């Protein structure tokens, strides 16, 4: 994939073609780094080329999403293999990320053996610290009981699985918006979780960088396909006073980004299979692409935080 | 004489077993036909994140079968908990219930709640 920028009207390093290329990726790894309050992201390829992370980086972490272990249909008959490849990319980074976040849909059908396979493969990752939030595929038949036992015990999650933690001055909030969904509705946080969010951020200074992560997008990406969260506005209301809020989601298996005031919304690729762009297919089901194209549509997200920057730069990297 | 009675008894049992086989075979065929002529014969097909038909009218006591033709798992959950919910149906898996008391039953997929459907049960 070319990194050439042909038109840069906004002087932001992204042209239309580049943006569309970015939109076309699904299932990649992105390294997020945090330095002094602003998140930035770099492709793993860029980092490998440069040899190390930017010098000003205080914190970097990596988002992986939508592994769908157990899926074996046309769109990708070996999702375990592509998940392994994603981990190989992380292991090949000259400076490993501080930790990973997995934004849901570890499995296809919430089966214990699918979780087992995921856990076994994850052992190969050099970065051992991983923070999880569930996708709807992880909580299909038991309301998320097994998921919470496996992935949320160590973080002392509240309610159906939400929690927060601090790293290098950044406040992270992991949310659950895939349970107790209402007929005709979208993803949902629910009153109990919303009240918890309000209390959780109460004592924080407004200059504290906030990273929110959850499975279903916390903005109305495409409600017709259920790609949104009905009560996300209320959650974002509690975060309005903060200078830098970054919202990281999965679920839609493609990179999309929106910036609204101090909030940057970003969705990551899947490591399993791509899904169609909003409204471009009869349904949001798995998208079949030619075999040679598949890995270019899978990937990871890489996050960086750099002090003094007024905007967020986000670049995702694919597995090709 | 004793032997004859025994034989008759045996024949009767054989006859009964044959009848049972015949009966179950016929039932099996009926179900298959219903599947083949869907939608309409109390079958609801799940395809492209939709229930088809979205509104189904049946008689009390009749069976209703959902079949998932998507590559995504779906569930059948009564909005007002009027009937037992299904587990997640993978591709080509089915879920069957028997229509109960006359009335209107709304349901949805708890994984993709945008997907909703209605069953109208009439007196048999």
Image (cartoon, coloured by chain):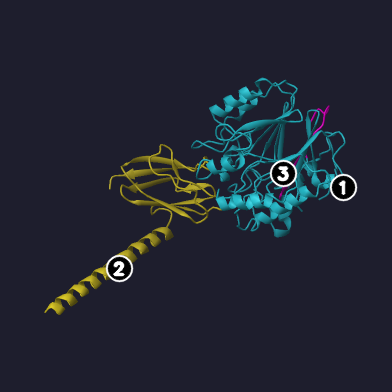
Chain colours: A cyan, B yellow
| Residue with the mark numbered 2 | B22
Q: In the rendered image of this protein, does residue A224 appear above or below residue A116?
A: above
| Residue with the mark numbered 1 | A49
The image position of residue A58, as x and y in percent, is 81, 33
Residue A303 seen by the camera: no
User: Residue A133: within the magenta?
Assistant: no
Label 1: how many Cα within 10 Å (few below 14, some 14–19, many 20+): few
Alpha carbon distance from label 2 to label 3: 62 Å
Element type at mark 2: helix
Label 2: how many Cα within 10 Å (few below 14, some 14–19, many 20+): few
Q: Is residue A150 left or right of residue B96?
A: right
Most foreground residue, B95 or B45: B95
Comparing labels 2 and 1, the label whose residue is closer to the camera: 1
Q: Is residue A263 left or right of residue A49?
A: left
Q: Residue at x 56, y 36 (%)?
A: A186
The image position of residue A7, as x and y in percent, is 85, 40
Which residue, as the protein is rendered here, is positioned at the far front?
A154
Comparing labels 2 and 3, the label whose residue is closer to the camera: 3
Most foreground residue, B77 or A19: B77
Comparing labels 1 and 3, the label whose residue is closer to the camera: 3
Mark 2 and mark 1 residues within 8 Å of each other at the beta carbon: no
User: Residue A308: within the magenta?
Assistant: yes
User: Magenta segment range?
Assistant: A298-314
Alpha carbon distance from label 1 to label 3: 24 Å
Mark 1 and mark 3 residues within 8 Å of each other at the beta carbon: no
Task: Please tell me the numbered disc located at residue A128.
Answer: 3
Q: In the rendered image of this protein, does residue B115 appear above or below residue B23?
A: above
**Same chain shared by disc 2 and disc 1:** no
Task: Please tell me the numbered disc located at residue B17.
Answer: none
């Amino acid at each position: 994939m070319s990194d050439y920028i042909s038109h840069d009207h906004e002087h932001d390093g992204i042209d239309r073609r580049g943006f569309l290329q970015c939109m076309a990726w699904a299932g990649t790894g992105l390294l997020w780094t945090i330095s002094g309050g602003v998140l930035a992201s770099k492709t793993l390829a860029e980092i490998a080329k440069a040899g190390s992370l930017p010098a000003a980086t205080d914190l970097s972490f990596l988002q992986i999403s939508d592994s769908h272990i157990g899926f074996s249909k046309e769109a990708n008959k070996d999702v375990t293999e592509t998940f392994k490849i994603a981990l190989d990319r992380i292991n090949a980074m000259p400076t490993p990320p501080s930790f990973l976040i997995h934004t849901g849909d570890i499995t296809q059908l919430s089966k214990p053996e699918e979780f087992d396979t995921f856990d076994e493969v994850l052992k190969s990752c050099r970065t051992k610290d991983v923070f999880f939030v569930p996708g709807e595929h992880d909580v299909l038949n038991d309301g998320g009981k097994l998921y919470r036992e496996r992935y949320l015990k160590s973080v002392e999650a509240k309610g159906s699985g939400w929690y927060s933690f601090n790293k290098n001055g950044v406040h992270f909030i992991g949310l659950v918006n895939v349970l107790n969904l209402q007929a005709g509705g979208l993803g949902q946080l629910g009153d109990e979780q919303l009240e918890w969010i309000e209390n959780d951020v109460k004592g924080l200074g407004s200059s504290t960088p906030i990273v929110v992560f959850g499975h279903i997008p916390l903005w109305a990406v495409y409600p017709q396909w259920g790609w949104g969260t009905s009560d996300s506005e209320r959650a974002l209301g509690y975060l309005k006073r903060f200078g830098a809020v970054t919202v990281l989601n999965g679920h839609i298996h493609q990179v999309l980004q929106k910036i609204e005031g101090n909030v940057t919304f970003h969705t990551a690729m899947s490591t399993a299979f791509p899904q169609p762009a909003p409204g471009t297919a009869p349904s949001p089901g798995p998208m079949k692409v030619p075999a040679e194209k598949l890995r270019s549509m899978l990937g990871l997200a890489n996050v960086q935080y750099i002090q003094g920057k007024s905007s967020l730069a986000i670049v995702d990297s694919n597995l090709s | 004489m004793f032997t004859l009675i025994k034989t008759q008894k045996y024949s009767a049992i054989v006859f009964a077993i044959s009848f049972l086989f015949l009966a179950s075979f016929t039932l099996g065929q009926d179900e298959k036909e219903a599947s083949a002529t869907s939608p309409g014969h109390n079958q609801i097909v799940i395809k492209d994140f939709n229930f088809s038909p979205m509104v189904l009218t049946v008689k009390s006591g009749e069976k209703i079968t959902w079949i998932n033709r998507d590559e995504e798992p779906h569930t059948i959950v009564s909005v007002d908990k009027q009937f037992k919910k299904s587990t997640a149906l993978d591709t080509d898996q089915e879920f069957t219930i028997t229509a109960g008391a006359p009335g209107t039953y709304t349901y949805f997929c708890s994984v993709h709640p945008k997907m909703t459907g209605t069953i109208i049960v009439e007196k048999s």
